Image: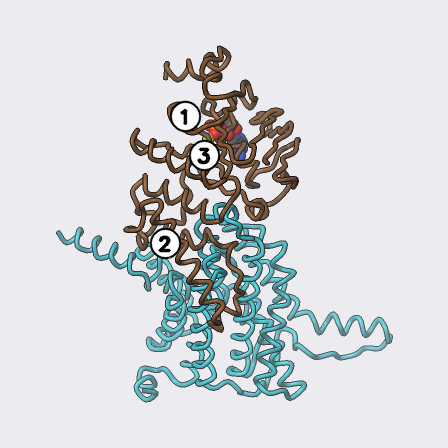
């Protein structure tokens, strides 16, 4: 459903991505691993429309999206989270989820001003869905707390809830467990598996190999902007190229 | 009420000017609330003032027609200005919009001369042409504006703003202020929202200009220059833009207090500058802002402990 062909992204003299070919099939969880600075975040930025490839193509369900602005990419059903959390910190958790449902609303500004029945019904529906998401991610108690003041783990979960709020078909997760303890990481793994159960495809950047094993159907390994290996978590773990470039290095860190 | 105000030095005209400042404060509230540092409001006020004044002096139109036309034309001019300019951010946007304000001012000053020149070239005769009045502006504008018009207008605006804040569009505005990229990745068309907000601000500023012209009777281009742009910004900075109450309070007080203290025109600028400085240092979020007050009291308590 998502297909990157020969994607290259150059920052001045630096090749952040170099001829990347990558596919995320329908309903599968694909992992993306690689050392810091390998170009993982750049890859997700290029898919989500915040950045655009210097060359190469990205297709999602038949639509070319490598030149599309972010809001149009989102409209096609791609949601994301960020390595450095980007919530609307002054707004409550609930409001963050209402904004996440921006595309689900139909009512015009005029209808909101006239307070029409359709507008009120719609607001009620958005509100209910937002509360359901808060419930699902264990955030019901903090619905009205400004997102910026939430504990770190709550912020990570809220950002994930916000990505789901747009009702995507593909979710891009950029290091979702960064800064989490092992039990929180496991719990988050359960959430990601639930995305799959709901029929979503997932592309997840992750450093934690236990999470990769817990959730991923396939793994790509990125190093210096190039895909150096691709396979199941088991084959990747045993691949000498990968061990040299990445896994071995992790042990020396 | 009015007697009490006039004992303070606030005559009805001053009260009306205060209310117009509140309207101008609300016009910049829209852009600031969306995270856009635009200083174009004085220019849109000028456009509204001139369009309204032309309609009432040349065509004997009533206030209602002047208002609609002034606000509408200000909004229409905002559309082509917004498209290129709103790509810019922060201080660059501020500078570009100041530039736009200068263009409007120079246009108003030179319009008559340019037309006269064109007519002279066409007919070969010397002609006098007077429509906008150059630097002397438009005079003997009918005084249509009444206090209740302004109060009603502010009430309607605040009602619309409260509704707006509870709408999808209003939430998108807040989202863009806090994180434009995250907003875009949630499906919000950032460019569109910014442009609409810019036009809304222009429409309100245009209406403020129409009221202003029909209050002070004589408008000149220099009334709507950089000073005015900074004054309008000061209303929002004093009151803050965490809620619409901020710019209203800012507009009322910054226009009213110099009158109460009977400052001469020269000292007004100093006063506004000083107030701005103090607010930015001690109340960076503006006066109408609970979190800023909490921080302020904590600071007071700490220095006295
Ligand atoms: N906007 C940018 N401008 C210049 N260089 C960038 C930019 N974004 C990322 N880079 C560079 O691209 C490389 C890959 O970065 P990134 O995608 O963040 O890596 P990762 O997420 O795998 O740690 C790094 O060397 C980084 O410095
Ligand atoms: Mg990264």
- Quadrant of the rendered structure where residue A249 is? top left
Q: Chain of mark 3?
A: A
Q: Position of residue A246 (x, y in %)?
A: 45, 17
Provide the secondary structure element on which disc 1 rests.
Answer: loop
- Looking at the rendered structure, which numbered label has been put on residue A131? 2
Separation of residues labelled 1 and 3 (CA atoms): 10 Å
Q: Is residue A129 left or right of residue B134?
A: left
Whether pointer 1 and pointer 3 mark residues with C-beta atoms closer than 8 Å, the reply is no
- On the same chain, marks 1 and 3? The answer is yes
Q: Colour of chain B?
A: cyan
Q: Is residue B118 left or right of residue B238?
A: right
Work out whether B284 lies above or below B28. above
- Looking at the rendered structure, which numbered label has been put on residue A174? 3
Number of other residues with Cα within 10 Å of mark 3, as a class: few under 14, some 14 to 19, many 20 or more:
many
Number of other residues with Cα within 10 Å of mark 1, as a class: few under 14, some 14 to 19, many 20 or more:
many
For marks 2 and 1, the one nearer the N-term is 2
**Mark 2 vs ligand 2: CB below 8 Å:** no
**Mark 3 vs ligand 2: CB below 8 Å:** yes
Work out whether B272 lies above or below A104. below
Q: Position of residue B275 (x, y in %)?
A: 35, 63
For marks 3 and 2, the one nearer the N-term is 2
Q: Is residue A209 left or right of residue A37?
A: left
| Mark nearer the viewer, 3 or 2 | 2
Q: Colour of chain A?
A: brown
Q: Residue at x 36, y 17 (%)?
A: A253
Q: Quadrant of the N terminus of chain A?
A: top right
* Nearer the observer, B188 or B112: B188
Q: Chain of mark 1?
A: A
Residue annotated with mark 1:
A207
Provide the secondary structure element on which disc 2 rests.
Answer: helix
- Quadrant of the rendered structure where residue A225 is? top right
């Amino acid at each position: 459903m998502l297909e990157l062909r020969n994607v290259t992204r150059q920052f001045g003299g630096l090749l952040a991505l170099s001829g990347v070919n990558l596919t995320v099939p329908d309903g599968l969880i694909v992992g993306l691993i690689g050392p810091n600075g390998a170009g993982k975040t750049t890859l997700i930025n290029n898919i989500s429309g915040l950045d655009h490839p210097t060359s190469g193509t990205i297709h999602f369900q038949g639509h070319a999206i490598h030149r599309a602005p972010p809001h149009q990419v989102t409209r096609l059903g791609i949601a994301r989270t960020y390595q450095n959390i980007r919530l609307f910190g002054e707004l409550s958790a609930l409001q963050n989820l209402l904004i996440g449902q921006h595309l689900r609303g139909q009512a015009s500004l005029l209808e909101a001003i006239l307070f029409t029945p359709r507008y009120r019904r719609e607001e009620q529906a958005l509100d209910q869905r937002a509360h359901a998401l808060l419930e699902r991610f264990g955030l019901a108690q903090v619905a009205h707390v400004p997102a910026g003041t939430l504990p770190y783990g709550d912020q990570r979960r809220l950002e994930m809830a916000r990505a789901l709020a747009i009702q995507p078909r593909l979710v891009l997760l950029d290091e979702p467990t960064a800064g989490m303890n092992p039990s929180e990481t496991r719990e988050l793994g359960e959430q990601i598996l639930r995305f799959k159960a709901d029929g979503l495809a997932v592309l997840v950047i992750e450093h934690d190999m236990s999470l990769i094993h817990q959730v991923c159907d396939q793994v790509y390994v990125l190093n210096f902007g190039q895909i150096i290996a691709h396979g199941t978590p088991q084959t990747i773990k045993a691949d000498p190229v990968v061990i040299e470039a990445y896994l071995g290095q992790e042990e020396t860190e | 009420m009015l007697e009490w105000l006039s004992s303070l030095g606030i005559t009805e005209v001053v009260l009306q000017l205060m209310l117009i400042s509140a309207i101008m404060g609300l016009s910049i509230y829209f852009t600031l609330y969306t995270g856009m540092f635009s200083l174009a409001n004085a220019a849109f006020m000028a456009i509204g003032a001139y369009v309204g004044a032309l309609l009432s002096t040349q065509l004997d139109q009533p206030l209602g027609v002047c208002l609609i036309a002034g606000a509408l034309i200000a909004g229409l001019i905002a559309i082509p200005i917004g498209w290129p300019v709103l790509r810019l951010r922060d201080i660059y946007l501020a500078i570009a919009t100041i530039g736009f304000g200068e263009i409007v001012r120079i246009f108003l000053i030179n319009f008559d001369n340019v037309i006269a020149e064109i007519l002279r070239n066409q007919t070969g005769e010397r002609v006098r042409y007077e429509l906008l009045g150059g630097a002397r502006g438009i005079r003997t504008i009918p005084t249509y504006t009444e206090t209740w018009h302004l109060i009603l207008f502010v009430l309607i605006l605040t009602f619309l703003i409260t509704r707006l804040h509870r709408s999808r569009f209003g939430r998108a505005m807040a989202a863009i202020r806090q994180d434009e990229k995250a907003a875009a990745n949630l499906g919000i068309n950032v460019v569109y929202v910014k442009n609409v907000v810019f036009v809304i601000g222009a429409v309100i500023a245009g209406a403020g200009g129409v009221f202003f012209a029909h209050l002070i009777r004589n408008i000149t281009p220099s009334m709507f220059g950089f000073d005015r742009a900074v004054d309008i910004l000061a209303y929002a900075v004093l009151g803050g833009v965490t809620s619409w109450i901020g710019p209203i309070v800012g507009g009322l007080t910054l226009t009213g207090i110099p009158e109460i203290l009977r400052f001469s025109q020269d000292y007004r600028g100093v006063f506004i500058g000083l107030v701005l400085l103090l607010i930015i240092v001690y109340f960076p979020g503006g006066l109408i802002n609970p979190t800023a007050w909490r921080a302020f009291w904590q600071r007071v308590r700490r220095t006295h402990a």
